[in-house]
Image: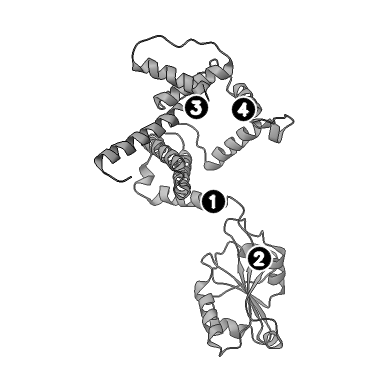
Amino acid sequence: MGYVRIVNATSPEAAATGRIVLLTTSHRVAPGLLSWPAWQALHGADRVLCADGEHPQLPYLREAGITVDEAAPTAEELIDACAGGHTVVVVATGEGEPTLTDGLARLAGSGRVSMPDLELLPASYDLPGARLLDLVQVMDRIRTECPWSSQQTHKGLAKYGIEEAYELVEAIEDGDREELREELGDVLLQVVFHARIAEEGGDEDGAAPFSIDDVAGGIVTKLIHRHPHVFGDETATTPEEVKEHWLRTKAVEKQRESVTEGIPLGQPGLALASKLASRVRTAGLEVPLPSGEGIGYELLAMAVRAEAAGVDPEAALRVAARAYRDAVRAAEGVSS
């Protein structure tokens, strides 16, 4: 996107009243990485102003030979600076200069002032995922300044990770996209929170610290390695072939002695039974179900049968349990 002209078309009168360029930049992009129209406007300006003497762009502008005056003019002063056809570029602060723009809009609306051309020129743009940088910065400040957050540990936060994961599943099953967006944010918060704690190093075991960049870098490497049909020379045309690639590369990475390794035993029972059955079936093993009496063994057999049929027994039970809940509420005369 190029610059946006806000007020005034180019005219002989405008040539005399000059031009104001409001230059905006993103703090999520490295300073100095500006668009070519932005550099043209800066080099062609009669004056360049910035109210923030600590603005991250200033060292790079001055290195490029641009003189930047630290000033916060009023709307009237800025218009006067443009008199005689001068061009003034205002490097906007992070807040976007609302006082200045409101003042210019008020003067333009009065009809009593000969206004310069007013242009908004975005000099840098956020890349996809840029708001994640904001999350990291906010989390860093919270960890430092919040009495509760600053005392949290991995173990203390573990229960919240479980809760947020279940709330995410519930949002998915409800089909509520707004709730889904919010719950994804809550899950993401857990990732960023744990990574921020890990930057401070291990607890009692003295483990080496790591950051959110290490977390992201690790999963990127894993995804590339486990998708040779996307990033390499392998070929996969069906979901089954993709899963085969994934399991094969995972087996090489982990070098496990048993297919049961890596399965968290603390997960819900039906999910645990289904995961064990999936590993057994994928490995092509013939493992008879343990014999025993009681509902536990019956549930195990049902979970294995469900997994073989491509049904998630945990999800299926939740659907049935919700129907049971609705029936209870109906019997109580309570609306759903």
Give the mark nearest the N terminus, 4 or 2: 2
Give the mark nearest the N terminus, 2 or 1: 2
Numbered tag placed on residue 61 in the rendering = 2
Residue ID for mark 3? 311
Q: CA distance from mark 3 to mark 2?
A: 61 Å
Q: Does the rendering let one see residue 256?
A: no
At 38% from the left and 34% from the top, the residue drawn is 155
Q: Nearer the viewer, residue 55 or 268?
A: 268
Say if 66 sits above or below 330 in the image. Answer: below
At 45% from the left and 39% from the top, the residue drawn is 173
Residue 333, x across and y down, in percent: 26, 43
Give the mark nearest the N terminus, 4 or 1: 1
Q: CA distance from mark 3 to mark 1?
A: 39 Å
Q: Is residue 91 left or right of residue 172?
A: right
Numbered tag placed on residue 133 in the rendering = 1
SS class of the residue under badge 2?
helix
Label 4–label 2 contact, CB within 8 A:
no
Residue 207, x across and y down, in percent: 47, 31
Q: CA distance from mark 4 to mark 1?
A: 32 Å
Within 10 angstroms of label 2, few (less than 14), some, or many (20 or more) residues? Answer: some
Q: Amino acid at mark 4?
A: Lys
Say if 97 sits above or below 235 in the image. Answer: below
